[in-house]
Amino acid sequence: MKKLNLMLAGAIGVAVATASLAQQGPVPIVGLVELSGTGATAGTNFDNGVKLAVKEINASGGILGRKIQYTSMDTQSAPQTAKALAQKAVDDKAYVVMGPVFSGSFIVSMAETKRAEIPNFTGGEAANITQQGNPYVFRTSFTQTTAMPKLARYIKNTVKAKSVAIVWVNNDFGKGGRDSMAKALEAEGIKVAADISTDPGQVDFSAAVLKVKQSNADAAFVYTNEEESARALRELKKQGYDKPVIGETTLTGQKVIELAGDAANGAVAHVGLTVDAPQPAIKAFDQKFQAEYKYKSDHNGMKGYSGMYVVKAITEKIGKFDGKAFAAAMHGATIRVKDSPGVLLDVHFDANGDLDRESFLVKVEGGKQIVTSTLPPVSPIQ
Amino acid sequence: MVDLLQLIISGTATGAIYALCALGFTLLWQASGTINFAQGEFVMVPAFLMLFFINTAGLPMWLAFLLTCLVAMVLLGYTFKRAMVDPLIRHGVIPLVIATLGLSIGVKQLVKAGVTAQAQPFNSIFPDGLLSLGALKVSYMDVGTLVLAGIIVVSLQLFLNRTVTGRAMQAVAQNTDAARVLGINVGRMVLYTFLINAVLAVVAALLVTPTYLAKFDMGESIGLKAFYAAIIGGFNQTRGALLGGVLVGVLENLTGAYISPAYKEGVALMLFLVVIIFRPEGLLGKTEERKV
């Protein structure tokens, strides 16, 4: 009996020691990112942003004294793969999941992380992501319902367009953007002269651009993913389109400018994040990113980077690695650059997981994004 | 009317690129009974080779193009024939078709993992801007594509019809046994066909990559459309490939402009289905009698 008790005590001791070691070991954070397929540009940048933040955080002692063990997995830009990998992230006991970036993939995969009560950050902008009552979902960029009204006001007041041709990509991201923009334009009294749907990964935009020209609209609004945006810009230039070309973040990203070349010049976009913004924290990020990866980050890299620093700030606020407590603390949270420079801009999260912060209007000139104005948050950050 | 003309011209330019690839399909089929489902990747690989020569080796475009032609002839012509087609063709078409499908996947994955999964920019050899002919405005890129593709096609036709080697190649395509009896080196003629196919792929890459962007999966669409175009025009006729390519390009443009861009990608498939049902030998194809 004595021997049995001794063995039992030993087993309990080993179990406690193992559990204790797990508590002190690295914190697993999983990235579900588009490293191939149509979202490769967005996913790779997002992933690189997260990795840079993780490197810095680990170099400065980790979070609450524990290092982060970040693993990124390739969703191949396919929702079904994203869902399977989200399940794997749950099995791997991820503390937080970063991504996917593509809205369509995220909408499918977030059910898995919600079931396991794991906070899940996305780079997706589709409005319906945060309209489904999932308390574990948080954005790293604006929702379309926040971004589009800002852009519609710009089209009305600055461009003074009475009609707009919308070219959008037929996926969750594009559909959400098209719906939000159509609504925002209507509210400003601007007519949608042509409503042109294109396919994800579409390579030939000649017919879409011809439709834009035929519509005789005062401006074109292009809302497609990065590679398609570059192809659309090239085709617009090829066909001699000479009216304003306006878009959201994906129209003037660094990769788009690189791919579209001269054709990107003149494009105007509302961007949530840009490395060309004048804020010191963003300038510092730009330098560090370029030193690490030898290229200029687009907004997705900034999303991944700032998202990771949000994880750090909130975890340190709650003082423990608890997904449920983390999610609760995120709702209504405000994180300031002076306390956590890695968040890049003062940011506020609402009850749905949507964020609010400053944003920018940019124009591409000479192959570079030029910030033409800084727009304030929808509600002042208290 | 001006819009219609513009659509037809730019559609013909796109169709000419499909036609170059489709020509490769028909040439290989006629000469060696080979159906190459990696034809799209045969366009993608030269695009990356040219980028390598331009960006890494710092060579001018024309030299990069010539070097790529050489590498493509060795890699996508000679090696493809010796390593894959020759050992498999004796077992029939089906094993070869499956092998080329595998090759297509393998090459894509190799480029994705070994080079990059992201799209890369590729400059056009033609200047930007529009050529104005009255109210008609056509881009220099479309005009240049049409002219270059036209030169290639006419040169190929002249080579096949006016030279001894070209006629020998046609003889092999029409009747291999009779050609062998006449003393034609069948093996060499077949090899020439593979080399020509490789060069056609390089030209297609040069013309299409500025629009498609260099990416590991850029060949999927063009390979499939070229295959449809070859079937539509007639798989056993080089003229058929030209007609099929241009028809697909123009109808895609018209559908995109007058119906919806959303249906554009389905045009080639619809046309393919209609031709297969009502004229299985293709619009210009000849019915092949089975030997008893």
Image (spheres, grey):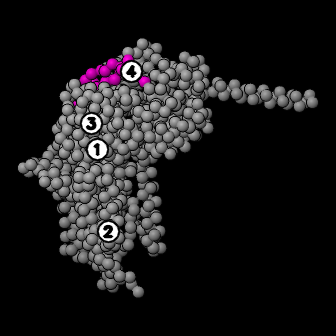
| Tags 2 and 3 on a common chain | no
Q: Is residue A319 left or right of residue B112?
A: right
SS for dot 1: strand
State the residue in front, B85 or A45. A45
Q: CA distance from mark 4 to mark 3?
A: 23 Å
Name the residue: 53% across, 29% down.
A136
Residue pointed to by mark 2: B275
Q: CA distance from mark 4 to mark 1?
A: 31 Å
- Which secondary structure is most common in the magenta stretch? strand
Q: CA distance from mark 1 to mark 3?
A: 10 Å
Say if A252 sits above or below A284 in the image. Answer: below
Q: Where in the figure is residue A158, as x and y percent of width and height?
A: 21, 25
Name the residue: 44% across, 61% down.
B101
Indicate the amino acid at tag 4. Answer: Arg
Q: Which mark is residue A357?
A: 4
User: How busy is the neighbourhood of tag 2: few (under 14 within 10 Å), some, or many (20 plus)?
Assistant: some
| Corner quadrant of residue A234 | top left
Indicate the amino acid at tag 3. Answer: Phe
Q: Which residues are magenta?
A: A355-379
Q: Which mark is residue A196?
A: 1
Q: Where in the figure is residue A218, as x and y percent of width and height?
A: 19, 35
| Tags 2 and 1 on a common chain | no
Q: CA distance from mark 2 to mark 3?
A: 39 Å
